[in-house]
Image (spheres, rainbow, N blue to C red):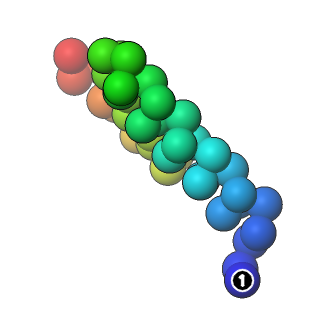
């Protein structure tokens, strides 16, 4: 398994995303900070 720590946190974030979406939150998980900033600037 490559990068077990990164895989662990990716799974944790995906689980958290599902929980937040279930509570009517809009969630976006970006691979990089730049992607998340670009998404916010497009709003």
Q: Position of residue 42 (x, y in %)?
A: 22, 23
Q: Is residue 33 visible in this depiction of the protein?
A: no
Q: Position of residue 5 (x, y in %)?
A: 78, 60
Residue 4 appears left or right of 26: right
The image quadrant that residue 38 belongs to is top left
Q: Nearer the viewer, residue 18 or 43?
A: 18
Q: Which residue is drawn at 71% across and 57% down?
A: 8
In this view, 3 is above or below 24: below
In this view, 1 is above or below 3: below
Q: Is residue 26 visible in this depiction of the protein?
A: yes
Residue 19 appears left or right of 25: right
Q: Which of 4 and 19 is in front in this view?
A: 19
Q: Report the number of discs.
A: 1
Residue 3 appears left or right of 41: right
Bin the neighbour count of mark 1 within 10 Å (Cα to Cα): few under 14, some 14-19, many 20 and up. Answer: few
Q: Where is residue 17 in the image (x, y as percent from the top left)?
A: 46, 35
Q: Which residue is drawn at 59% across and 54% down?
A: 11
Q: Which of 31 and 19 is in front in this view?
A: 19
Please identify the residue farthest to the bottom as the structure is shown: 1
Q: Identify the residue position indicated by label 1 in the image.
A: 1
Please identify the residue farthest to the left as the structure is shown: 43
Q: What element carries label 1?
A: loop
Q: Residue at x 72, y 83 (%)?
A: 1
Quarter occupied by the C terminus: top left
In this view, 36 is above or below 5: above
Q: Which residue is drawn at 54% across and 34% down?
A: 16
């Amino acid at each position: 398994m490559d990068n077990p720590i990164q895989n662990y946190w990716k799974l944790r974030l995906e689980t958290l995303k599902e929980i937040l979406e279930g509570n009517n939150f809009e969630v976006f998980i970006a691979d990089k900070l730049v992607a998340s900033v670009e998404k916010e600037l497009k709003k």
